[in-house]
Image (cartoon, helix red, strand yellow):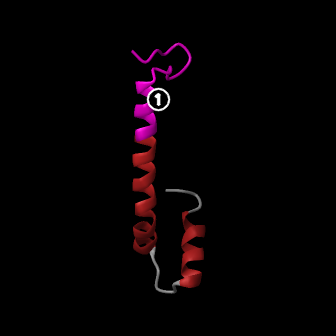
């Protein structure tokens, strides 16, 4: 878990007293899915352009 999880939960409970771990998880789930989609698309674009993945690591 993130080191900032407790801090984020504390900020959330400041505005929603009944908020718990499940509420925080359900509010951050759309963000994590969007980031997964964005990074996956970025990887495929990077790969399609043939840009090396790292020093000495060719794509194909």
- Can residue 51 be found in the magenta stretch? yes
Q: Residue at x 44, y 34 (%)?
A: 43
SS of the residue under disc 1: helix
Quarter of the picture containing the C terminus is: top left
Q: Residue at x 46, y 85 (%)?
A: 18
In screen coordinates, is 2 left or right of 50? Answer: right
- Can residue 45 be found in the magenta stretch? yes
Q: Residue at x 41, y 48 (%)?
A: 36
Between 59 and 25, the one lying in front of the other is 59
Between 43 and 26, the one lying in front of the other is 43
* Residue 49 position (above or below residue 12): above
Magenta residues (range) = 41-60
Figure quadrant of residue 4:
bottom right
Helix, strand or loop: magenta stretch: loop
Q: Residue at x 40, y 69 (%)?
A: 26
Q: Position of residue 47 (x, y in %)?
A: 42, 26
* Residue 59 position (above or below residue 30): above
Figure quadrant of residue 22:
bottom left
* Residue 54 position (above or below residue 18): above
Q: Position of residue 37 (x, y in %)?
A: 39, 47
Please rate how many residues cluster around mark 1, counting C-alpha atoms within 10 Å: few if below 14, some from 14 to 19, many from 20.
some
Instruction: Return the residue at label 1.
Output: 46
């Amino acid at each position: 878990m993130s080191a900032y999880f407790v801090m984020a939960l504390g900020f959330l409970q400041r505005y929603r007293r009944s908020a718990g771990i499940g509420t925080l998880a359900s509010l951050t789930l759309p963000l994590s899915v969007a980031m997964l989609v964005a990074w996956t698309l970025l990887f495929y674009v990077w790969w399609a352009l043939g840009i090396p993945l790292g020093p000495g690591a060719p794509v194909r």
